[in-house]
Image (tube, rainbow, N blue to C red):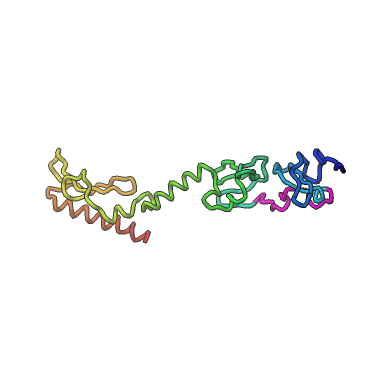
Amino acid sequence: MREYPSLIGQRFGKLVVREQLPSTPKGQRRWLCRCDCGNDHTATTGNLTGGHTTNCGCLRSPDLTGRVFGRLTVLGRSEKRSPRGNRTTPLWECRCTCGAITYKATDTLTNPDESMCAACAAQYGAEAARRGAGFVGGTQLTKIRSMKTTAANTSGCRGVYLDKKSSRYRARLTFQGKVLNFGSYDRFEDAVKARQRAEEEIFGKFLDSVE
């Protein structure tokens, strides 16, 4: 019976043969190779010795160094790899606009939800959630559109309360984290009117600017 030489340990281009695998149904001997990029690759004797297979396919991957994807600028190829099922995929070293260094696979670079570092992605997710809840510039549009009286209000009008020390009604409005006061009044009705004027002036202009 003819004996065939072992290719284990031999180099073919970027591939180094690691072990022999079961032959193909046609009897072609197959070899498990490790590419210089870190990927494993299977090739037949004929393809290896004939020079048809010299790498795992990584040489076909374009160089993304210097390219910008979202908030990331690619600095170059890295030695890091990410598991993908039974294989691994190479990662690019990238710098985020915030200055952080992160590592991304080619497909995640082109994903707008992932083309940033982890810290920026968390902030992006929080901002997206706030936008989904109707927040613009720190103000919830649905809240100022409805302007329903809260359970904590005891006067019957949102933004109007009775100052027990002075026995006068005060009108105020909270907008973008600031409490704005619009005077105190002997009559409840006057405080309500002051609050309503403030809503029309401040909330009205804001809603017009975002719609």
**Residue 172, horizontal then vertical, whole percent:** 24, 47
**Residue 61, horizontal then vertical, whole percent:** 69, 52
At horizontal 80% and vertical 39% (from top left) the residue drawn is: 8
Relative to 25, say whether 166 is above or below: above
Q: Quadrant of the C terminus?
A: bottom left
> Magenta segment range?
49-66
**Residue 160, horizontal then vertical, whole percent:** 19, 48
At horizontal 43% and vertical 48% (from top left) the residue drawn is: 127
Q: Nearer the viewer, residue 197 or 120?
A: 120
At horizontal 81% and vertical 47% (from top left) the residue drawn is: 45
Is residue 84 one of those drawn in magenta? no
42 to the left or right of 151 = right
144 to the left or right of 165 = right
104 to the left or right of 4 = left
151 to the left or right of 24 = left
Q: Nearer the viewer, residue 23 or 200?
A: 23
At horizontal 60% and vertical 45% (from top left) the residue drawn is: 104
**Number of numbered labels in the structure image:** 0
Q: Quadrant of residue 178?
A: top left
Residue extending farthest to the right is 2
Q: Quadrant of the N terminus?
A: top right
**Residue 146, horizontal then vertical, whole percent:** 26, 55
Q: Nearer the viewer, residue 125 or 4?
A: 4
